Image (spheres, grey):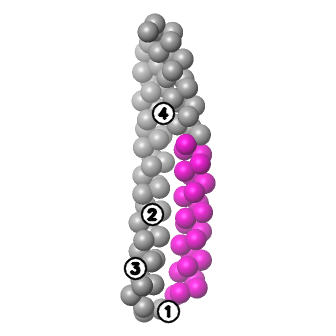
Amino acid sequence: MSIEEIKVKLGRAIAAAGVAKQITAAVTTDSVDTAQLARDALHDSEHPEVKEGLACLKAATDELTLVVRRLDTSVASTSEFQEKLG
């Protein structure tokens, strides 16, 4: 595989990661909104299932946020490597 072919593949990977980040960021926003709606609707509930459900929503949002950060880091690192190839 030539350097040019590698650079093309890296460009495709960067583009795909960018799309994945956009999608994941949108899902993160939806998750935050859903969690807020659930907290508003269930604010005074003491049921263990409600507390567990809210905790799961928070955990999902936290994971999504990490994925967005990892995608950012991946794009930055891959772009840097691509630039070093010339």
Residue labelled with disc 3: 52
Mark 2–mark 1 Cα distance, whole angstroms, equals 22 Å
Hey, what amino acid is under mark 1? Asp
Using the image, determine if residue 68 lies above or below residue 30.
above
Residue 9 screen position, x and y as percent = 51, 21
Please report whichever mark, 1 or 4, sits nearer to the chain's N-terminal start: 1
Hey, what amino acid is under mark 3? Glu
* Label 4 element class: helix
Residue 17 screen position, x and y as percent = 52, 37
Question: Which quadrant holds the N terminus?
Answer: top left
Taking the image as shown, residue 45 lies to the left or right of residue 29, namely left
| Residue 33 forms part of the magenta stretch | yes
Using the image, determine if residue 73 lies above or below residue 84.
below
Are the residues at dot 4 and dot 2 in contact (C-beta closer than 8 Å)?
Answer: no
Single out the mark in the foreground, 3 or 4. 3
Residue 32 screen position, x and y as percent = 55, 66
Hey, what amino acid is under mark 4? Val
Mark 1–mark 4 Cα distance, whole angstroms, equals 43 Å
Please report whichever mark, 3 or 2, sits nearer to the chain's N-terminal start: 3
Are the residues at dot 1 and dot 3 in contact (C-beta closer than 8 Å)?
Answer: no
Mark 1–mark 3 Cα distance, whole angstroms, equals 14 Å
Are the residues at dot 3 and dot 4 in contact (C-beta closer than 8 Å)?
Answer: no
Residue labelled with disc 2: 60
Mark 4–mark 2 Cα distance, whole angstroms, equals 23 Å
Report the residue at 59% width, 45% height from top. 22
Are the residues at dot 1 and dot 4 in contact (C-beta closer than 8 Å)?
Answer: no
* Residue 31: quarter of image: bottom right
